[in-house]
Amino acid sequence: MDFDIIQKLVKPADSKVILLVMDGLGGLPTHAEDFTELEKANTPNMDRLAREGVCGLHQPIGPGITPGSGPSHLALFGYDPIRYQVGRGVLAALGINFDLQDGDVAARGNFCTVNSNGKVTDRRAGRIPTEKNQELCEKLRKIEVPGVEVFIDTVKEYRFLLVMRGENLSGELADTDPQSTGLQPLPPEPITSEAEHTADRVRQFIEKAGEVLSDDAPANMVLMRGFSKKPDWPAFPDVFGVKPAAIAAYPMYRGVSRLVGMDILETGEKLADEIDTLEKHWEDYDFFYFHVKKIDSAGEDGDFDRKVSLIEAVDASVPQIMKLNPDVVLVTGDHSTPSFMKYHSWHPVPVLLWSKYCRNDPVNRFGERACMAGGLGPRIPATDLMPLMMANAGRLEKFGA
Amino acid sequence: MDFDIIQKLVKPADSKVILLVMDGLGGLPTHAEDFTELEKANTPNMDRLAREGVCGLHQPIGPGITPGSGPSHLALFGYDPIRYQVGRGVLAALGINFDLQDGDVAARGNFCTVNSNGKVTDRRAGRIPTEKNQELCEKLRKIEVPGVEVFIDTVKEYRFLLVMRGENLSGELADTDPQSTGLQPLPPEPITSEAEHTADRVRQFIEKAGEVLSDDAPANMVLMRGFSKKPDWPAFPDVFGVKPAAIAAYPMYRGVSRLVGMDILETGEKLADEIDTLEKHWEDYDFFYFHVKKIDSAGEDGDFDRKVSLIEAVDASVPQIMKLNPDVVLVTGDHSTPSFMKYHSWHPVPVLLWSKYCRNDPVNRFGERACMAGGLGPRIPATDLMPLMMANAGRLEKFGA
């Protein structure tokens, strides 16, 4: 549904919603046995929710499209992931949990090597270690560019983040990375005339970076890519009329949540930490996005059994969550990461929606193939789930008379 | 999915895909027995693929829309059949396998009868036999129009094809058929100013046609309809990053395949000929569209039993196809042609997708009602199937990070 429609229908209610996302939940049967990870897992608590609620499988982006975690989370938050695309600089900022402000422009930086003629000889500066990167970032932070604030942060190895903050900045700049060695870095060309001011500021930054790094070969220059501005999107609290909090340990997920306007709660990396955080803030919010990362990592490692036991651990926490007495609980993944494939995949993701207003379906087991027979269907668009949660939470008015 | 998105995600892979289309596959139970043609057919090989793969029913165009073969094939090829519509002149060219070039304008022609005042007395020239048509086309071929090449081909009875080739031609011309007798043929009015040049050329052609046919009453004039230019669409190999070949015996299907940029392989009318062609060219291509026509014809004849045995014949060839070791096989029809209705119908069409990356579903029999419980769902848009085939072939990158 268009946000315009949703926003007109939203009404307040004294109800609480939990969106529980097990990263990379969806799986495939292996050659060895005819079970997916979720089907193999012993999940009595989620099975009960499935029995009482309504199930299905959601399609995060589109048919055959393997989602990155950013777009698939946006889809779960109700944002059309094709329309709401994040620039790569912004994505880098999210990835290290940088607190982007409205109007900020972010870009990904590489430390690189240039020779005495200024030509690039190594686009990755010999893959310097992260510690070296941190030292060099200290130097870059000393650079002053008139009219803008400059932020520099280490990402990893040769990669760092540049953020510029100031008036009238634009993300419409071309990359300075010439994409091959033997060439000079390109100037940061403005793609539109509005970007000329920004291009000028970036040019000054790069010039000064070359000066302060001149003695730091192999990391004696920088290449900048993916300039992008913090997007000006409708805010989640405004669209859905809730006060939302994100409980997520990993920077990327905290970043995406912040981008749509959720409050980010401090929490730990363990599931128990996240549950503590949920309990502690239960009275302060009415929408909780609760993210469990490690299931995806097990899938990417191809570790079927570890993925199974991590799912079982989440299941074991479900009674504690239900004790808070939420009105609506949606349990799903952001995408599939079959351990059979060791990678994200395009396969639809099991989803269960529980509330006292669900029209329950024949599904009595939370698993991929059981969910195919569910009331939500085998390929519900992920963006449809937010309106369904809101309806079940009594937060949407009737449309028309 | 938008072609823009797909095209950005496409990556090369060493994998081979077969799209096996049984024309008019979908059926209905008859009054006599509670089976569709496909359900009645003994299809152990397709049943095995259904068991190992994922099934469903596809909706070729839209709800309740009975497809022509052109649009339903475009949909299977991933082209939105509402957006990518073919002009009627172009369709006529495809129907007789005329090799349209970029910039060509095609139109459908009728031989007609005019009286001494130039008024139409029979819009179909007494439905002259095809042999007579061929003679008259010989005469029309002698017509020369300055600045354009003119091609004339017999279609059938009173119908022929006109193609003009030259610089700056336009298909934006009104029909010359006055649609009723007692009126003079209309001039080929340009609908846009860019079409004036073409209108002038067509006017010259029609004038000369009247002259060369003056002694051939009842076929002493021509009426022209459906002017259209070969469409400038994204090419299938560019969109999906494959090298595609079409194996189809009938002109219409060869024409549609050529229109989207597939190579057209020479083959015979028999299924065995088509299999031979597939085997012979297996190493030369990585995407094969394989078309079996006669199942549709049996449906149109209302011959339930013939349709059953033709389906069984295709099933019997499946092991020979699988011996080639394809990575992805999709088996479906372009539309339904229930022998009960003796006509194309709007009913969704059974589809099975087989690859080693399918999340198999409970369907273990390839038939309309079995497929309703499949993982692809009972109404997957036909245009979703190409991205799914490409994903299963390992040919699509992740979307976003």
Image: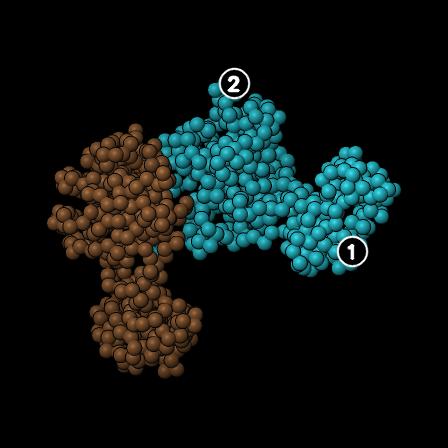
Chain colours: A brown, B cyan
| Image coords of residue B391 (percent x, y) | 42, 47
Q: Residue furthest right?
A: B215
Dot 2 crowding, Cα within 10 Å, few <14, some 14–19, many 20+: few
Q: In the image, is A18 to the left or to the right of B353?
A: left
Q: Which mark is residue B31?
A: 2
Q: Which residue is mark 1?
A: B145
In the picture shown, does residue A109 fall above or below B69? below
Secondary element type, mark 2: loop
Residue A168 seen in the figure = yes
Identify the amino acid type marked 1: Val
User: CA–CA distance between discs 1 and 2?
Assistant: 58 Å
Quadrant holding the N terminus of chain A: top left
Quadrant holding the C terminus of chain A: top left
Query: Which chain is disc 1 placed on?
Result: B
Identify the amino acid type marked 2: His
Residue B321 seen in the figure = no
Along the line of sight, the residue nearer the viewer: B350 or A84: A84
Q: Which mark is residue B242?
A: none
Along the line of sight, the residue nearer the viewer: B307 or A105: A105
| Image coords of residue B162 (percent x, y) | 72, 47
Dot 1 crowding, Cα within 10 Å, few <14, some 14–19, many 20+: some
- Residue A19, by quadrant, is top left
Query: Which chain is disc 2 placed on?
Result: B
Query: Of label 1 and label 2, which has the lower sequence position?
Result: 2
Q: Name the residue: 53% across, 47% down.
A: B83
Q: Name the residue: 24% across, 49% down.
A: A242
